[in-house]
Amino acid sequence: MVGYFAVSKAGHDKDQIYVILECDEKYAFLCDGENKKIAAPKKKSWKHIQKINIRVEETLYSKLVNREQIYDTEIKYALRKYKENNNTF
């Protein structure tokens, strides 16, 4: 699940798109690089998000899986590219 896009289904951030940074059985830790930074990701229950079956580009995905350092700008760029390609605003 790490490295996939997800959309919030509930809460004040409903319809917000995030990248999944980490996850466990109950929660996903989400980042958008702007309001929710890598240093303090949003903890959200799986029942309140919908995973999108599209992954971030390969370089960023590799960094996430290998737990290498990533920057908020990389997350923002990935989200911007996703929105451009999918006409999501």
Image (cartoon, helix red, strand yellow):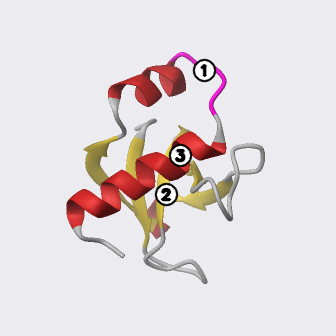
- 15 left or right of 43? left
Q: Amino acid at mark 2?
A: Tyr
Q: In the rendered image, which quarter contains the C terminus?
A: bottom left
Q: In the rendered image, which quarter contains the N terminus?
A: top left
Residue 17, percent from left and from top = 45, 64
Residue at the disc numbered 1 = 67
In front of the other: label 1 or label 3? Answer: 3
Q: Please provide the residue range marked out in magenta.
A: 66-70
- 38 left or right of 87? right
- Vertical position of residue 55 compared to residue 16: above or below: above
- 21 left or right of 84? right
Front one among 49 and 37:
37
In front of the other: label 2 or label 3? Answer: 3
- Vertical position of residue 24 compared to residue 41: above or below: above
Front one among 17 and 9:
17
Residue at the disc numbered 3 = 75
How packed mark 3 is, by other alpha carbons closer than 10 Å (few <14, some 14-19, many 20 or more), is many
Q: Amino acid at mark 1?
A: Arg
Residue 26 in view: no
Residue 37, percent from left and from top = 70, 52
Residue 83, percent from left and from top = 33, 63
- Closer to the N terminus: mark 2 or mark 1? 2
Q: Amino acid at mark 3?
A: Ile
